[in-house]
Image (cartoon, rainbow, N blue to C red):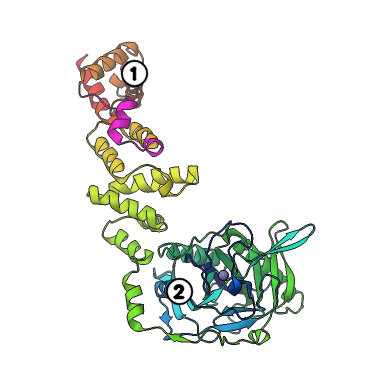
Amino acid sequence: MTTATKTDFEPVIGLEVHVQLKTRSKMLCGCAVQFGSPANSLTCPVCLGLPGALPMVNRLAVEYGIRVGLALNCQIAHRVKFDRKNYFYPDLPKGYQISQYDEPLCFDGELQLPLMDQAGNPKICRITRAHLEEDAGKSIHMETGTLVDLNRAGTPLIEIVGGPDLRSPEEAYVYLTTLKRNLSYLGVSDLSMEKGSLRCDANVSIRPRGQENFGVRSEIKNLNSFRAVRSALEFEIRRHARVLEGGGKLSQETRLWDEDKLETRSLRSKEEATDYRFFPDPDLTAFDVPRPWVDQVRATLPEMPEKRLLRFLHDHKLNRADAEWLVSDRNVADFFEACVALHDNPRKVAPWVVTELGHELNERNASIGDLKITPAAVVELIQLLESGKLNNITAKEVFRDMVASGEGASAVARRLNKLIEQDSGEVDRAIAEVLAEFKDAAVADLRAGKQAALGFLVGQAMRKLRGKANPKELGPKIEAAVKDS
Ligand SMILES: [Zn+2]
């Protein structure tokens, strides 16, 4: 990153990520968790904060929390204790949020980032803690005033607090994509920033390189995409550097990212934990987390991407870029493995999934579940290519059709009339025609030893055969025919 400053500053970044857990009902009442329902239709006395209503903990929310913690290599607390975090906001009808203060459900974890140091070791970012809490409602600002929708109030959240271990906006971006990737393997959340089921706040400070103490930090809120996180951090780092270089002083504050103006602006001075007057919630007594339960949850964890990556590198002998791309989406990696189960050469399968399928997913902005193509069809296509019934070009055409139609490779190849015929009569006739046509030009050149002419003749013969031939076989046939003539 370029900053026009004289001092060499080092950024220190830590991210807090809120993830909505995809339980059927809310964390402390039986109301449904659903996005896009009519305002305030999913509410009850508990999530409306009516006096005397008593909350009850959703077991599955705690289980999902444990699942997230284990996947992030965290310790799991021996008991669950909830606290009240007191503050006033119109979309928080109780006047406090139920959260976890001094005893988070998960702590002391780490996330391995695909950023290698010179020795080839991945960068590790600590996960300080991950705790459960309830979401607030939503304020909808209109011209005529502000409306409050409490459908979201009480939705279970897990807040994942990363250590101050990231040293650039780019590392922060990689942290977020890696965290999202790993969480996607767990199936505990939609992870949609658009729908607000994944939200991120960024803490950033800078210090002269070599200094051990942290500088004064700002917390940036209102970050609506991973790109916004990166841009906001870049802006904030430049702002800090300018203030310090100009002899000014920074104050600890919360700032909002303005996506239109591409700048942050001050919202309020940063509150301290003491401002919230945390205390244990008297309505929710602490309860134990038995170890057999934790072990049971651990046993249901899928193979996580870091492990899968190593297996793809060592067992399937893929290159790192391909392997990383494949494991970045659990469904894509599953699709690839389903292909490999039908074809014993993973390196032949990989380009079809990584390059061709990847291209189609990109073009259509789709996920693999949206496409009709099956692993069996991909393998059938590879086999047609290997047996010489398709060439590299026609195989790609057939592949694109398969993605759209969901049909098998042979069926598509036949429908598109791309199968290379066994009968060599057609090929011989095409070659004879081309040789007659270019007798005085390319054929003469080839006889005179100009090898470039061969490529031209192969191309002409391919055209006559409408692409239904294998150029690797045409070359020697043409050379032999020229010698004989
Ligand atoms: Zn409710």
- Residue 311: quarter of image: bottom left
- In magenta, the rendered stretch is 402-422
The three-letter amino acid code for the residue at tag 1 is Lys
On the picture, is 379 further left or further right than 356? Answer: left
Residue labelled with disc 1: 464
The residue positioned 73% from the left and 71% from the top of the image is: 267
The C terminus lies in which quarter of the figure? Answer: top left
Q: Residue 10 shows which numbered tag?
A: none
The reply to whether residue 426 is visible in this rendering is yes
Q: Secondary structure at mark 1?
A: helix
- Residue 167: quarter of image: bottom right
The residue positioned 38% from the left and 35% from the top of the image is: 405
Circle 1 Cα neighbour tier, 10 Å, few/some/many (<14 / 14–19 / ≥20): some
Task: Decide whether residue 418 is among the magenta residues.
Answer: yes
* Mark 1 or 2: the one toward you: 2
The residue positioned 36% from the left and 42% from the top of the image is: 373
On the picture, is 480 further left or further right than 166? Answer: left
Task: Decide whether residue 45 is among the magenta residues.
Answer: no
Residue labelled with disc 2: 65
In this rendering, the answer to whether 476 lies above or below 139 is above
- Residue 234: quarter of image: bottom right
On the picture, is 27 further left or further right than 352? Answer: right
Q: Earlier in the sequence, mark 1 or mark 2?
A: 2
**Label 1 close to label 2 by CB (< 8 Å):** no
The three-letter amino acid code for the residue at tag 2 is Gly
